Image (tube, helix red, strand yellow):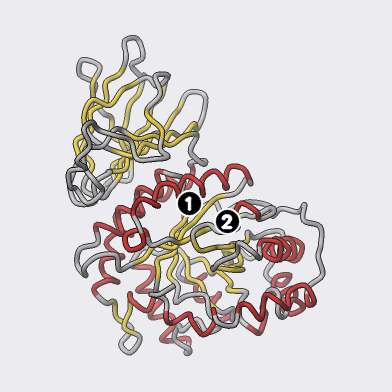
């Protein structure tokens, strides 16, 4: 992780800690699951997953910063547990993600203390759940599965979170609740973006889980957050249920506790996402993820293909759908929400240009109700059908949620 220098001291100790796990923690039954998965789309502020969470140490400054976090439309913070922190999060209607990598209650280095803490937090509505790991776990999935099972035993009322680099080992986890990954595709290869997303979605479906991801806050220039917004919206189309913005050091000046330009950029993205959170939180994992053929790259440049192609491994729109797309290029998520209601999320394939999407409904398939979620009013707005067609815009790097009722 070349760009994660604040975490290197912690990461350098991981091999030693991992080698101790078998000796320090008993293995419970791996068959247990918590009462429920997260019920709300999560937007998390974090300084990383090291031992020290780097938040203000005194309650007054901590609370003042929490008000900024809340105003920037975050829904949760992750940090080292302290009762007063949880109390202040409750006061400001924020969830607290307990980092179980702190030595005082380390999930596999100090399991007795971790157990005591987890049991004390059962049914606490301010606790989101427990962060157990966030790095390469290809060779340690067995240990992470043990940690998940331990926490399920200690506190079956809150979910667990295990993250990894490039999804390494996630498919090997037993009974994960939230699995997560990071790849920072704008820097490390945009061709890996959709393969990783679909792999994450398939693991979530196969494990009866959901997936989150870390998204880099500095993929472009300050003041131009299109790339970060593109990553968020295309990820949501592929089933993302929570975002951990990476990372707090770039978002806030820790001397003044004021937002940097990157912090302001992410706050603006959160503001655009915020009206959709109640609806996103209701949606299950996508039934399928499709794509229109694309003529442009995600940077808005001509692909140079002889004919438009679909980014792999996304699927073309099947003929069984009631509509075809006659204009616009988008990732399209298909959510089966009930027998009479279906949702489709259209995420712009272009990070830097707007799209006009036109849907043409097949004969005798016109829906009884067709609506688009209005971000300003946070309500559903009817879409008009003219000659069995409807058109709606998608701003650059953004998405639109459509509801079809029959």
**Residue 168 or residue 123, whichever sits in front:** 168
Whole-Å distance between the Cαs marked 1 and 2?
Answer: 9 Å
Q: Which residue shows up at 64% across the image and 84% down it?
A: 103
Looking at the image, tell me whether mark 1 or mark 2 is earlier in sequence order. 2
Circles 1 and 2, Cβ within 8 Å, touching? The answer is yes
Q: Which residue shows up at 56% across the image and 66% down it?
A: 136
Q: Position of residue 268 (x, y in %)?
A: 27, 62
Residue most extreme to the top: 364
Name the quadrant containing residue 357.
Answer: top left
Q: Position of residue 39 (x, y in %)?
A: 54, 51
Q: Horizontal placement of 149 versus 242: left or right?
A: right
Residue at which label 2 appears: 178
Label 1 neighbour load within 10 Å: few <14, some 14-19, many 20+: many
Residue at which label 1 appears: 241
Q: Quadrant of the C terminus?
A: top left
Q: Which residue shows up at 26% across the image and 21% down it?
A: 360
Name the quadrant containing residue 274.
Answer: bottom left
Label 2 neighbour load within 10 Å: few <14, some 14-19, many 20+: many
Q: Position of residue 328 (x, y in %)?
A: 22, 34
Q: Position of residue 323 (x, y in %)?
A: 33, 21
Q: Secondary structure at mark 1?
A: strand
Q: Quadrant of the N terminus?
A: bottom left
Mark drawn on residue 273: none
**Residue 118 or residue 203, whichever sits in front:** 203
Q: Horizontal placement of 104 versus 259: left or right?
A: right
Q: Which residue shows up at 49% across the image and 31% down it?
A: 336
Name the quadrant containing residue 135.
Answer: bottom right
Q: Secondary structure at mark 2?
A: strand
Count the marks: how many?
2
Q: Horizontal placement of 339 versus 243: left or right?
A: right
């Amino acid at each position: 992780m070349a760009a994660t220098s604040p975490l290197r001291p912690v990461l350098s100790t991981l091999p030693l800690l991992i080698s101790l796990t078998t000796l320090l923690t008993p293995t419970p039954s791996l068959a247990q699951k918590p009462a429920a998965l997260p019920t709300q789309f999560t937007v998390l502020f974090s300084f990383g997953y090291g031992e020290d969470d780097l938040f203000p140490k005194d309650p007054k400054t901590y609370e003042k910063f929490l008000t900024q976090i809340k105003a920037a439309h975050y829904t949760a913070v992750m940090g080292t547990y302290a009762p007063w922190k949880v109390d202040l999060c409750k006061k400001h209607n924020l969830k607290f993600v307990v980092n179980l990598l702190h030595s005082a209650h380390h999930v596999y280095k100090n399991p007795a203390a971790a157990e005591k803490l987890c049991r004390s937090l059962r049914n606490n509505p301010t606790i989101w759940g427990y962060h157990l790991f966030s790095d390469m776990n290809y060779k340690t999935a067995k240990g992470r599965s043990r940690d998940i099972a331990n926490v399920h035993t200690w506190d079956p009322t809150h979910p667990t979170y295990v993250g990894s680099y490039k999804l390494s080992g996630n498919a090997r986890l037993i009974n994960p609740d939230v699995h997560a990954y990071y790849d920072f595709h704008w820097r490390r290869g945009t061709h890996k973006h959709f393969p990783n997303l679909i792999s994450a979605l398939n693991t979530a479906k196969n494990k009866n889980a959901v997936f989150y991801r870390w998204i880099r806050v500095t993929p472009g220039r300050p003041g131009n957050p299109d790339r970060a917004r593109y990553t968020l919206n295309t990820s949501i189309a592929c089933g993302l249920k929570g975002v951990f913005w990476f990372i707090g050091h770039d978002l806030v000046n820790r001397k003044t506790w004021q937002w940097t330009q990157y912090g302001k950029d992410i706050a603006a993205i959160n503001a655009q996402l915020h009206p959709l959170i109640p609806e996103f939180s209701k949606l299950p994992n996508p039934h399928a993820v499709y794509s229109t053929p694309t003529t442009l790259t995600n940077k808005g440049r001509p692909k140079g293909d002889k004919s438009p192609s679909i980014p792999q491994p996304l699927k073309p729109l099947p003929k069984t759908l009631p509509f075809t797309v006659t204009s616009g290029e988008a990732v399209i998520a298909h959510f089966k929400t009930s027998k009479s209601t279906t949702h489709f999320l259209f995420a712009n394939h272009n990070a830097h240009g707007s799209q006009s999407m036109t849907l043409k409904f097949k004969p005798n398939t016109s829906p009884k109700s067709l609506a688009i979620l209005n971000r300003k009013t946070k309500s559903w707005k009817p879409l008009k059908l003219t000659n069995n067609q409807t058109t709606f815009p998608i701003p650059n790097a953004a998405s639109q949620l459509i509801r079809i009722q029959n």
